[in-house]
Structure formats: C-alpha cells, structure tokens
Amino acid sequence: MRRPRTSLIGLLGLAATIFNPLVSPALAQSSTAPGNVNSAALLPNPQTGKLEPTGPLGLAAAIDLALSANPTLAAAARELQAVEGAVIQAGVRPNPEIATLVEDTQNKATRTTTLQINQAIELGGKRAARIESAERGRDVAAADLATQRLEIHAATVAAFFDVLVAQERVRLAEALLDLAQRATQAASRRVMAGKVSPVEETKARVAEGSVRVEFNQAQAELASARKRLAATWGNPSPRFERADGRAETLPAVPTSEEITSRLAASPALARARLEVDRRSALAEVERTRRIPNVTVSLGAKRAEELGRDQAVVGLSIPLPLFDRNQGNLLEALRRADKARDELAATEVRLSTEIAQAHERLKALSLEVGTLQKEILPGAQSAYEAASKGYELGKFSFLEVLDAQRTFFQARSQYLRALADAHRAAADIDRVLGAVAASSPIGGGQL
C-alpha cells in the first residue's frame, strides 16, 4: 500500500524540474529564424497581401511586418505624399486672364472691340513665403510619419513580449494542472486505501479546480496577446505558431545623462519645433498678403468708326483701405504663439513620461533580479522541502499544495515583471527615438 504514496511524491518532485525559475525551456530554446522558413510556411495576409510566417515568429520579423503593413502607418505615409502636392502647388504662379469688351453692339459702324490679356504680378514675397510654409508643412508630415513608426515599433515590441510571457504562463499553468490532476488521483487512491481522510481528497479537488481556472485565464490572455501582436500589422487573425525569443534577457537601463542628451533630439520634440516653424511661416504668408498685387493688362482695341486698331496697356492696383488682411494675420500670429506654448508643454510632458518609464524600468530590473536570485530559488527550495517532508509524513498534502502555489505565484510575478520591463523599455525607445537597439531580438528576419 506504499506505492501510491511514492507515486505521488514522484509527481510532486517532478514539479521542481518543470518550474525551474532559472532555465525556462519555452524561453531558453534555440531561436528558429523565420527567415529560414521555406515558402510553404508563409501565407499572404488577406488584408494587406504581405507574407506572414505560419511557424515561429521572431521579434525582428514581427517589427518588419508591422512597419511594412500597419494601416495607421500607411495612412501617415499617404499624408506625406499628399503634402508633396501642396509644395508643388505653392510654387505655381497666377494664371493670365484673357478678356474681351464690345461697345455698341447694335451699330457695327460705330462698334468698338477690345481684346486684352491680364497678368497678376505677386508682390511682397508672397510666392516665396507660400513655398516656405508648404515645405515646413511637409517637414511636419515627415515628422508625423517618423513618430508614428516609433509608436508602431514600441507597440510591436511590447505586444511581442506579452505573447512570450503569455506562452510561458500557459505552459506553467498546464504543467501545474497536470500535476494537480495526478495529485488528486493519488489522494483518491490513498483515501480508498484508508491512509488519509476523505477531506484530503476534497482539498485536492478544490486545488485542481482553482488551477484549472488559472489555466483557462492563461489561455485567454495568450489568445488576446496574439491578436494584439497580429493587429500591429493589420491582421485580426494571427497565423504564426508561436513567438520565438528570450524574454529573460532584459534591455539595458540607460543612464540619466544619456536620457537627457537623447531627449533633446527626440522625434516628438522635433515635431513640435517643426510645427512652430510651420506656424511662423504661415504667419509670414498672411503678412505678405497685406501688400496688394499688381495686375498688368496688354491688348488691342478695334474701332470700326475710325477703321484702325489701337494698343491698350493697363495697370490696376487694389487700394488697401478696408481689407488689409489684419484678421488673418492676427490669427496666424496667435497660432504661432500657441505652437510655442505647445512646444514647452511637450517638453514637460516628455520629460515626465521618460522619467516615469526610466524609474519603472530600474525598479522592474531590480524586481526581476531579486525574484531570479532570491525569491524563486527560496520558493523552489521550500517546495522541495515540503515534498520530502510529505514523503516522511511530516507535512500534510495541503502544505505541499500551498508550497506549490507559492512557487507558482512567484514564477507568475517574475513573468509579469519581465513583460512590464520590456514594455517600459519600449516606452523609452518610443520617446527617445531609438529603434530598440538595446532590446534583445530572438529570431531572424522574414
């Protein structure tokens, strides 16, 4: 009758290997580069037509897919192309006008016919100011595109590591569920053998049900994370088999001096400065419009009564007595002031965001290190001791399950800290404009 007890201890002891906190088989496996996947493992996205891997997906491949197929990024690129048309139009000169005038239509003998061409000549640097403002608008559109690329990049990195961590949570929950099911069976056999009270079997079944709930939650979180990752390249239905990489390799924490120097050249600040330039250029356009244009006329006049043609030369200049474009100029000047205020507000906002992300990354790096070096080994040691004590009859089955649950919760906290750390690093890269050079990439290119 000793055999069931020994079988249970063997199962419980196996968990120490399954839940090893320092070597995770799912995350430490060798990376399979999607670039080495044959053409049969690639399928076109029905929305974009881009090829997507159906096997393992690396971080680099996910970023390439997102940057090449994200619909929001495509819209920003279209905007930049549209602004190119505005630059072309800004340099166009006014078209000439052709006009005709007929006097005395009733009597042909005294009729006078005038045909002339009118050409408006822009004064005050209107065309140059218009071109300048259009070019500044193009610069803003290009900065918007660059900023959007960083947003998509950061979202892809965060979503990728969310999938990595969710995969590991499912693996842990599945292993724990299998262990709980076998433990319940072992407890049932011991009850039937009269070794323990039926209450112990009830406790084991309750523990199994709790683990099953956690397993279902882990599966739901993985499905959601997979959809978030696939959404970055415009596909609502993920096709990749799994995310392939190492979440345990944390990105380097930048120093405060490095952050300060890189923040001054961040894309968001550059975009705000360009907006100030664009608004100033628009104000200059309105200022030049205060100077009226000159219209030159040249033509010929046929006087039937005289029987000869006469040259016609004309010059017209509007008198700026009432409309001096004062309202539009005032609006443009105030909008330029608003752009300067928004630049100052953007500097404060970005400084706050980067400081928070930096502190969060430092705290999470310390948390990951503490969990990896102290808490997880201690929880594993306590679990192994409880397993041996149960075998020797010193601990109850409930105490073993409690030690097992403590270890599982510590492992879950460790995975959650990893995901949060990678997300904080992605936020730093998004603000500072880095292309995740410090983030580890597991997997190859498409």
Image (cartoon, helix red, strand yellow):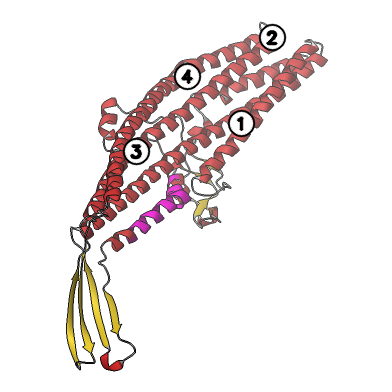
Q: Residues within 10 Å of mark 3 (few under 14, many from 20)?
A: few
For badge 3, the amino acid type reads Ala
SS class, disc 1: helix
Residue 309 lies in the magenta stretch: no
Whole-Å distance between the Cαs marked 4 and 2?
Answer: 27 Å
For badge 1, the amino acid type reads Ala
SS class, disc 4: helix
Earlier sequence position, callout 2 versus callout 3: 2
Q: Which mark is residue 396?
A: 2
Q: Which mark is residue 371?
A: 4
- Residue at left offset 35%, top offset 26%: 355
Q: Nearer the viewer, mark 4 or mark 1?
A: 1
Provide residue 243's location: percent of width, then percent of height.
Answer: 51, 40
SS class, disc 2: loop
User: Does residue 328 appear in this view?
Assistant: yes
- Residue at left offset 53%, top offset 37%: 163
Residue receiving disc 3? 437
Earlier sequence position, callout 3 versus callout 4: 4
Q: Quadrant of the N terminus?
A: top right
Task: Give the vertical position of 337 relative to 169 (above or below).
Answer: below
Q: Which mark is residue 218?
A: 1
Q: Answer whether labels 4 and 2 touch (C-beta < 8 Å).
A: no
Provide residue 80's location: percent of width, then percent of height.
Answer: 36, 54
Earlier sequence position, callout 2 versus callout 1: 1
Q: Nearer the viewer, mark 4 or mark 2?
A: 4
In the image, 430 versus 15, the foreground residue is 430
Q: Nearer the viewer, mark 2 or mark 1?
A: 1
Whole-Å distance between the Cαs marked 2 and 1?
Answer: 29 Å
Provide residue 27's location: percent of width, then percent of height.
Answer: 50, 33
Earlier sequence position, callout 4 versus callout 1: 1
Whole-Å distance between the Cαs marked 4 and 1?
Answer: 21 Å
